[in-house]
Image (cartoon, rainbow, N blue to C red):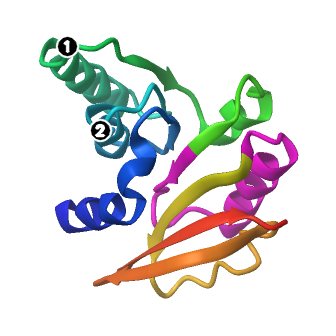
C-alpha cells in the first residue's frame, strides 16, 4: 500500500495543493489524508463501513492537531453509489476510487457514468482507480480516457480524465 500511495503521489505531484478531493471507498482514508497533508483545500471521505469511518475521523483529528493551516474535510458514511446519485455540489479536481476487489463491474460502470453525467469533474480533473490487475475494466470507464497505468503485484492503478 505504501508503495502504491508513493507512486500515486509521484504521478499527481503538485496537483494536490489547493485541490478539492473526493476519496470514494475511502477505507483508512490514507489517500485523502495524504492530499490534506500536501495542501488540498478540501477532502470528502466516503465509505459505508463504520469502522472505516471511525478510523478516518481519528486520523483526520490527528492530522489537524499537527497542521497550522485550516483544513477542510468531511467524513461521510454512505454507500458510494447513493452518495454519487445525490451529490452535485461541486467539481472535484481529484477523485480516488479504491473499491473492494470483488465489487460488481456493473456497479463500477454506474459509478463512472454518474461521475460523468453529474459533471462533478472538469476536463483537468483526474480519477485514480485501483483494482485487481486481471480485471477487464475498459467498458466500465465509458466516457473517460486512460492517461496512465501502473502495475503493483496484483494491483493496477490507472489515471483517467474525461474524454473531450
Most foreground residue, 43 or 17: 17
Which percent across, then down, holds residue 132? 44, 76
State the extent of the magenta-drawn residues as a range.
Answer: 94-121
Q: Secondary structure at mark 1?
A: loop
Q: Is residue 144 above or below residue 76?
A: below
**5 with respect to 146 (left or right):** left
**Residue at 67%, 60% in the rendered image:** 108
Q: Is residue 10 magenta?
A: no
**160 with respect to 8 (left or right):** right
Most foreground residue, 28 or 61: 61
Tell which circle, 1 or 2, labels the residue nearer the N-terminal end.
2
Which percent across, then down, holds residue 31? 34, 46
Q: Which residue is mark 2?
A: 38
**Residue at 51%, 72% in the rendered image:** 158
Q: Is residue 119 magenta?
A: yes
Q: Which residue is mark 1?
A: 68
Which percent across, then down, holds residue 138? 70, 81
Residue 62, image quadrant: top left
Amino acid at each position: 500500500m505504501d508503495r502504491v500511495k508513493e507512486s500515486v503521489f509521484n504521478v499527481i505531484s503538485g496537483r494536490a495543493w489547493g485541490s478539492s478531493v473526493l476519496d470514494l471507498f475511502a477505507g483508512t482514508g490514507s489517500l485523502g489524508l495524504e492530499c490534506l497533508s500536501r495542501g488540498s483545500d478540501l477532502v470528502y471521505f466516503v465509505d459505508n463501513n463504520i469502522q472505516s469511518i471511525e478510523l478516518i475521523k481519528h486520523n483526520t483529528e490527528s492530522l489537524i492537531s499537527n497542521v497550522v493551516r485550516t483544513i477542510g474535510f468531511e467524513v461521510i458514511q454512505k454507500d458510494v453509489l447513493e452518495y454519487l446519485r445525490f451529490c452535485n455540489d461541486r467539481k472535484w479536481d481529484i477523485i480516488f476510487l479504491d473499491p473492494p476487489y470483488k465489487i460488481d463491474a456493473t456497479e463500477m460502470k454506474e459509478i463512472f457514468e454518474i461521475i460523468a453525467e453529474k459533471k462533478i469533474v472538469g476536463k483537468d480533473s483526474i480519477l485514480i482507480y485501483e483494482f485487481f490487475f486481471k480485471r477487464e475494466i475498459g467498458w466500465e470507464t465509458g466516457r473517460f480516457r486512460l492517461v496512465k497505468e501502473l502495475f503493483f503485484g496484483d494491483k493496477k492503478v490507472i489515471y483517467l480524465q474525461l474524454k473531450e
